[in-house]
RNA sequence: GGCGACGUAGCCAAGUGGUAAGGCAAGGGUCUGCAAAACCCUCAUUCGUCGGUUCGAUCCCGACCGUCGCCUCCA
């Protein structure tokens, strides 16, 4: 039974989330336009969408998640032409990089990634339905949506639409619209641009129609969740609503979830400002994928995230704390002490409760992480007092694992020590035993240079990779 | 001009009508041959400013100051 509450842009309120079909949530996420490599801001949006999916599953729901890949669009056409290749050749590498980035950041794959160009017939059908219901008009071979035919237009963005005159900035020279607020469903063919021969004439789809067509094809005319970043609320999502509800007469999406933007060092990310970051860039600069994941996850999705060098350093230290805790638990768990679980089980239970309560509150990852660190401190204190038996350690470890099904930030270090490294550690131990500290320090430095950090604890030497 | 968001310690960031989670950094300590690492402790009488409502406000209302976003392609 879920008591997850999500902020719904449609009502501007937090609402209790329950799926239309009990136990099965359906979500559509606005995905990348593959005219370039995805940047860190795009990835933030995809990351919290995945977090939402994981959390729904964590609560026992089945989730069907669909994310579009937009592979036909003005910038793609422009840049492909510039590169002298067709749009398919042009978008292919960017699509591949997108998927690689998801894997690197531990963003789980959606169930489907439909491409716009694979769904032209569905879009045509949708436009024809809109035509039959009187929502469209044609001008110069293009088909437009006439917003005055849909009384509820504007309900998502809650933008009191300004009179036509104030929208003089809208460029109207290319396509002939009756009203500047109307938007194009199907664009008439232009010389040198890719086009499809259809019942609507030769041309290509407008920007918004793909999402309506593909979302309804895979998730139904009404589905549970639609995600994206705040900049898509208007006009993209508003127009999706118009197209879909204009065609079906039914509510399109029950929960519209929008995430805030990421800024870099307090500035909007842009190529011209030189602060446009991609995942491979950041990794090249020495950050690990997990550090980046943590930095993106630590700030709840509806809060603007200031992505900085400093935030990555913070993430690194915070993760080290979590990893050390996991190692400590594993060591205790391996012990032979047969006491029954006591303090540990209690701490673990309290943690899982607080963790879930945090995420239930509109995916408050900051609160959930706060609960995690509180558990770590409490368990460490108890362990220092010898109150953590192996059974306790196993309970705590299980709780950490359980939370990590959603967070996925714990290091999975399965690397086995090379014989060489092992030999050096052994040699250092014997040097220390014969109090040859010069030799032992030399070996320690050598290992450090190899990326192996030694920790001399009361239980002996522990090592980990830097 | 229209719509909206935000302003909490050095930095990041939760939060509640009853007196401020957590992380990083910093300082102190434990441990150690020395270190490092690890662990523990400390660290905002105060939540942009000024008023109002209230027994009581950081949280509610109003004004102001400041930052930012959308209204045009955009995650």
Image (cartoon, rainbow, N blue to C red):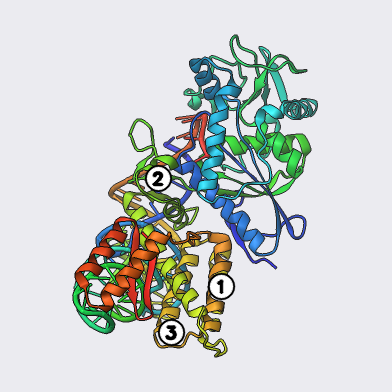
Determine whether A20 is above or below A399 in the image.
above
User: Left of A25 or right of it: where is A230?
Assistant: left
Q: Residue at x 70, y 40 (%)?
A: A215
Q: Which residue is mark 3?
A: A382
Q: CA distance from mark 3 to mark 1?
A: 16 Å
Q: Residues within 10 Å of mark 2 (few under 14, many from 20)?
A: few
The answer for which chain carries disc 3 is A
Point out the tag, 3 or 1, that comes first from the N-terminus: 3
Q: Earlier in the sequence, mark 2 or mark 1?
A: 2
Secondary structure state at the residue bearing disc 3: helix
Location of the C terminus of chain A by quadrant is bottom left
Mark 1 crowdedness (10 Å alpha carbons): few <14, some 14-19, many ≥20: many
Q: Which mark is residue A96?
A: none
Q: Nearer the viewer, residue A220 or A104?
A: A104
Which residue matches tag 2? A283
Foreground disc of the pair 2, 1: 2
What secondary structure is marked by label 2? helix
Identify whether A153 is placed above or below B26: above
Q: Quadrant of residue A356?
A: bottom right
Q: Are marks 3 and 2 in contact (CB under 8 Å)?
A: no
Residue A41 appears at what percent x and percent y? 46, 43
Q: Which residue is mark 1?
A: A399
Contact, mark 2 vs mark 1 (Cβ under 8 Å): no
Question: Looking at the image, is A369 positioned above or below residue A43?
Answer: below
Q: Name the foreground residue: A341 vs A454.
A: A454
Instruction: Looking at the picture, tell me which residue is in the foreground, A172 or A104.
Output: A104
- Residue A65 lies left or right of residue A104; in this view the side is right
């Amino acid at each position: 039974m879920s008591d997850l509450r999500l902020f719904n842009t449609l009502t501007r309120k937090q609402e209790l989330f329950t799926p239309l079909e009990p136990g099965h949530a359906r979500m559509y996420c606005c995905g990348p336009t593959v005219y370039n490599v995805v940047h860190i801001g795009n990835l933030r949006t995809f990351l919290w969408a995945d977090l939402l999916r994981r959390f729904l599953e964590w609560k026992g729901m089945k989730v069907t998640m669909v994310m579009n890949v937009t592979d036909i669009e003005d910038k793609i056409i422009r840049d492909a032409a510039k590169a002298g290749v067709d749009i398919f050749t042009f978008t292919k590498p960017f699509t591949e990089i997108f998927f690689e980035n998801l894997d690197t950041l531990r963003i789980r794959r959606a169930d489907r990634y439909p491409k716009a160009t694979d769904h032209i017939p569905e879009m045509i059908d949708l436009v024809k339905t809109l035509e039959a219901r009187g929502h469209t008009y044609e001008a110069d071979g293009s088909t437009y949506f006439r917003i005055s035919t849909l009384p509820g237009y504007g309900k998502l963005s809650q933008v009191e639409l300004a009179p036509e005159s104030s929208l003089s900035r809208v460029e109207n020279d290319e396509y002939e619209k009756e009203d500047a607020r109307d938007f194009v469903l199907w664009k008439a063919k232009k010389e040198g641009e890719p086009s499809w021969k259809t019942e609507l004439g030769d041309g290509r789809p407008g920007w918004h129609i793909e999402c309506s067509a593909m979302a309804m094809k895979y998730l139904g005319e009404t589905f549970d969740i639609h995600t994206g970043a705040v900049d898509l609320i208007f006009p993209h999502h508003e127009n999706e609503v118009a197209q879909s509800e204009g065609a079906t007469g039914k509510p399109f999406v029950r929960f519209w979830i929008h995430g805030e933007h990421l800024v870099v060092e307090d500035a909007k990310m842009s190529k011209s400002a030189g602060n446009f970051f991609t995942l491979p860039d950041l990794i090249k600069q020495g950050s690990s994928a997990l550090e980046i994941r943590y930095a993106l996850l630590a700030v709840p999705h509806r809060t603007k995230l200031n992505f900085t060098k400093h935030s990555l350093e913070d993430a690194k230290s915070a993760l080290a704390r979590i990893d050390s805790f996991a190692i400590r638990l594993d060591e205790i768990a391996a012990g032979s002490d047969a006491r029954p679980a006591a303090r540990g089980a209690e701490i673990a239970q309290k943690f899982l409760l607080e963790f879930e309560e945090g995420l239930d509150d509109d995916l408050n990852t900051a609160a959930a992480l706060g609960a995690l660190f509180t558990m770590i401190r409490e368990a460490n204190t108890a362990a220092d007092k010898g109150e953590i038996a192996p059974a306790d350690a196993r309970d705590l470890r299980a709780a950490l694992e359980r939370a990590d099904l959603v967070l996925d930030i714990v290091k999975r270090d399965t690397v086995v020590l090379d014989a060489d490294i092992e030999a050096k550690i052994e040699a250092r131990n014997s040097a220390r035993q014969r109090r040859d500290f010069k030799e032992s320090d030399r070996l320690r430095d050598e290992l450090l240079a190899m990326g192996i950090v030694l920790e001399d604890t009361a239980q002996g030497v522990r090592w980990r990779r830097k």
